[in-house]
């Protein structure tokens, strides 16, 4: 049920106090007025600055009120089928007299055809009013509503819109996650700067949305540049992703396929878990959002839960998208030292992962599986759990080639086989760092760096397979129990046979 249909149901069922949660007051007022117009109800709005104004119907002489208590008294005195919209009235809830008067009035209005709708940016309702209140959230505009914003601009004299049909659709998708006002400003900015709005401005709108999402405090919008060619090895994982490349299309829905829920990437630090998360957005051509769970927690009571709900709603609005939760064992750890706030945030995220219907593909990465609460990896949260081990010789060769090409060097100019053999026990991040170290040596000596420089850098580095030998053994034992799929090999037996033996710890 959409917002207007639900609000109409509340008013017809004589709900006396409704709180509409939104930052888009103007759009909320239009929607409330449309509902009242269709239901042949009068609608009056009030705010502390300008008093009463009529939004719909024929209310006759407008009442006057300059303070919250007088407003509530006028609501009680008014006759007929009227909806009263109170703007920013949540600011008045700290007054005990106003709270009591509003509660009394809400109880008396049950026997009338009048309702009070409070438009507020926060869903926090005083405990005294919760039993009388129904909270209704105005969702962010969808593609059709954003297209309406664009259509409104086309009716402005002198505005030139030169979008192709495909470009217009992509522009709407680029603006998903923005409010109607934010999308309108982004469109207008492009028009003023270049004199017209065309397909070139899709990327400009994406940049504007990136800033909007960053303001949500807990989500970060990542540009997607990585492709499977930027990730060395992990062939099984890549094939799994390619099979689901078209899974978010209408064609897949018509075929009867559900949208994939997500995947967990468990493994040794530096094996490419974060890079894989970025690569998925590029492969599937979907927006990539990173959830910073630490940023969810605020100093005010209830602030963390509100930020969590807002971040998850925003992700659903942007959907289809990829939601990346990095280092889940830290992000989803919860304890009892914060009056249960972290436990509630943790539960909200897990419930959303299980119950979400929006096509948000969750990618969770973790280094220490022993620190993860068992309910995180329960069936239903993720479609598959992959284990990323130390790269094999073939994968190391591929990783060297990838990073050399990234730095505009030809792999053919290096002895890749020798480098792969010398890097046994090294993870991808360590291999990349040895190339960077070798480049510094060559640059300092005003020459090209060589295979020998990279081998020398390898010999100077202490790999994780030495410093975290026990951790690697524990992770492999966890995978051996059948709890995860190898990211590199189809069969567990083959994965175990191909295990790279961790290097012996260095002597004292």
Image (tube, helix red, strand yellow):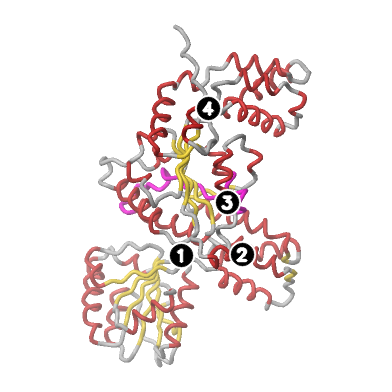
- Residue 410, quarter of picture: top right
Q: CA distance from mark 1 to mark 2?
A: 16 Å
Going 29% across and 79% down the picture, which residue do you hit? Answer: 16
Label 1 SS: loop
Q: Position of residue 456 (x, y in %)?
A: 65, 14
Q: CA distance from mark 4 to mark 1?
A: 55 Å
Classify mark 3: residues with Cα within 10 Å, few (<14), some (14-19) or many (20+).
few
Q: Nearer the viewer, mark 4 or mark 2?
A: 4
Q: CA distance from mark 4 to mark 2?
A: 56 Å
Label 2 SS: helix
Pick whichever, 85 or 243, lies toward us.
243
Q: Looking at the image, do the residues carrying marks 1 and 3 touch, with CB atoms under 8 Å apart?
A: no
- Residue 394, quarter of picture: top right
Residue 293 belongs to the span the image colors magenta: yes
Which residue matches tag 3?
243
Label 4 SS: loop
On screen, residue 61 versus residue 323, left or right, reads: left
Going 69% across and 62% down the picture, which residue do you hit? Answer: 190
State which tag comes first along the sequence, 1 or 2.
Answer: 1
Q: Is residue 361 visible?
A: yes
Which residue matches tag 1?
23
Q: How many marks?
A: 4
Which residue matches tag 2?
185
Q: Position of residue 305 (x, y in %)?
A: 35, 53
On screen, residue 339 versus residue 326, left or right, reads: left
Q: Looking at the image, do the residues carrying marks 3 and 2 touch, with CB atoms under 8 Å apart?
A: no
Q: Looking at the image, do the residues carrying marks 3 and 4 touch, with CB atoms under 8 Å apart?
A: no
Which residue matches tag 4?
498
Q: Which residues are magenta?
A: 279-302
């Amino acid at each position: 049920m959409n917002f207007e249909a639900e609000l109409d149901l509340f008013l017809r069922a004589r709900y006396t106090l409704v709180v509409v949660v939104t930052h888009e007051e103007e759009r909320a007022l239009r929607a409330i007025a449309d509902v009242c117009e269709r239901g042949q109800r009068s609608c009056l709005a009030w705010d502390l600055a300008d008093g009463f104004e009529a939004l719909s119907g024929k209310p006759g002489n407008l009442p006057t009120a300059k303070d919250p208590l007088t407003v509530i008294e006028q609501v009680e005195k008014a006759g007929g089928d009227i909806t009263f919209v109170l703007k920013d009235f949540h600011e008045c809830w700290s007054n005990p007299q106003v709270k009591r008067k509003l509660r009394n009035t809400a109880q008396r209005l049950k026997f009338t055809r009048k309702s009070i709708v409070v438009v507020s940016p926060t869903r926090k309702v005083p405990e005294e009013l919760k039993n009388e209140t129904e909270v209704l959230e105005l969702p962010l505009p969808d593609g059709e509503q954003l297209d309406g914003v664009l259509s409104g601009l086309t009716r402005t004299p002198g505005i030139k819109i030169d979008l192709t049909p495909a470009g217009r659709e992509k522009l709407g998708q680029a603006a998903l996650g923005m409010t109607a006002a934010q999308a309108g400003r982004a469109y207008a900015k492009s028009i003023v700067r270049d004199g017209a709005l065309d397909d070139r401005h899709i990327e400009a709108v994406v940049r504007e949305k990136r800033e909007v999402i960053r303001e949500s405090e807990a989500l970060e919008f990542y540009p997607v540049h990585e492709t499977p060619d930027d990730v060395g090895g992990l062939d099984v994982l890549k094939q799994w992703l390619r099979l689901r490349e078209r899974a978010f299309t209408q064609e897949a829905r018509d075929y009867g396929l559900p949208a994939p829920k997500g995947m967990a990437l468990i493994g040794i630090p530096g094996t490419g878990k974060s890079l894989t998360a970025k690569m998925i957005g590029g492969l599937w051509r979907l927006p990539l959002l990173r959830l910073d769970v630490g940023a969810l927690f605020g100093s005010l009571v209830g602030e963390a839960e509100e930020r969590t709900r807002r971040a998850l709603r925003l992700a659903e609005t942007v959907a289809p998208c990829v939601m990346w939760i990095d280092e889940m064992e830290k992000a989803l750890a919860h304890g009892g030292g914060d009056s249960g706030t972290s436990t509630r945030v943790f539960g909200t995220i897990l419930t959303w992962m299980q119950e979400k219907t929006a096509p948000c593909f969750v990618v969770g990465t973790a280094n220490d599986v022993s620190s993860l609460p068992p309910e995180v990896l329960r069936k239903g949260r993720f479609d598959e759990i992959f284990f990323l081990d130390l790269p094999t010789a073939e994968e190391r060769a591929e990783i060297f080639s990838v990073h050399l090409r990234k730095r505009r060097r030809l792999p053919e100019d290096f002895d890749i086989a020798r480098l792969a053999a010398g890097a046994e026990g090294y993870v991808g991040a360590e291999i990349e760092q040895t190339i960077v170290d070798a480049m510094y040596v060559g640059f300092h000596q005003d020459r090209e760096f060589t295979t020998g420089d990279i081998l020398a850098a390898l010999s100077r580095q202490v790999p994780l397979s030495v410093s975290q030998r026990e951790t690697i053994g524990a992770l492999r034992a966890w995978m051996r129990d059948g709890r995860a799929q190898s990211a590199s090999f189809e069969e567990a037996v083959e994965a175990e046979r191909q295990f790279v033996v961790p290097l012996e710890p260095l002597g004292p």
